[in-house]
Image: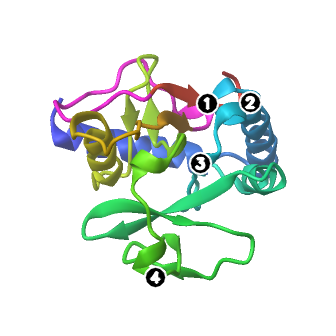
Amino acid sequence: MLHSDKTELRRLLIAKRTSLSSDERQKAEKNIVERIVKTVQWQSAQKIASYAPFKSEVNLSDLHESAWQEKKTLYLPVLQHDQLVFAPYLPNSAMRLNQYQISEVDTDSDTLVTGCVLDLLLIPVVGFDNRAYRLGMGKGYYDKTLSTLLNEPLPKFAKRPFFMGVAFACQEVIKLPIDPWDIPLDMIVTEKS
């Protein structure tokens, strides 16, 4: 499919996600968090990258609380030179808005890490299909990050993290249009599956 098809699909799926009532959203987010913490990937992970929700994305604040209680190290993405790197995220972390008005940890560059130090990477999803392909916001930052982790040599003793997409069930489509650079995730977690 053409890029414009992805653009239209993105618009429709964001509208669908945004149309969830406050009650539907809260129940779904609670179920999503419960499903994530029950996964082997969560339970075995010590270094986890999550995200700060942008607009109507699934809010994982309760999951962040669980991570801190379980003494896991939590990171949030920071956009740096058209790449995602990850900053340690604590309950008292100072935050700033990036050029897209997405919250990021306000930190010095010496605390930033690349994805190869992570065990689990939680990724916000605009749309997804049963092959675990994802549709993102369209800027390609997660695509670049996933590609780097899959295709470039990793430092000695490094491994790639588990790629876990996070979405509401209403964001699933039968089959996403994919491009050669699209990478399927390892798993998508919703309130239903």
**Residue type at numbered disc 4:** Asp
Name the amino acid, label 1.
Answer: Val
Assign the C terminus to one quadrant of the image: top right
- Quickly name the residue at label 3: 48
Q: Nearer the viewer, mark 4 or mark 2?
A: 4
Q: Which residues are magenta?
A: 167-185
For disc 1, the marked residue is: 189
Tell which circle, 2 or 3, labels the residue nearer the N-terminal end. 2
Per the rendering, the mark at residue 108 is 4
Disc 1 + disc 3, Cβ < 8 Å: no
Residue 107 percent across, percent down from the top left: 51, 80
Of the residues under marks 1 and 3, which one precedes in the sequence?
3
Looking at the image, tell me whether mark 4 or mark 2 is earlier in sequence order. 2
Q: Give the distance between the C-alpha atoms of the residues marked 2 and 3, in whole angstroms.
A: 16 Å
> How many C-alpha atoms fall within 10 Å of the one at disc 2: few (<14), some, or many (≥20)?
some
Q: SS class of the residue under badge 4?
A: loop
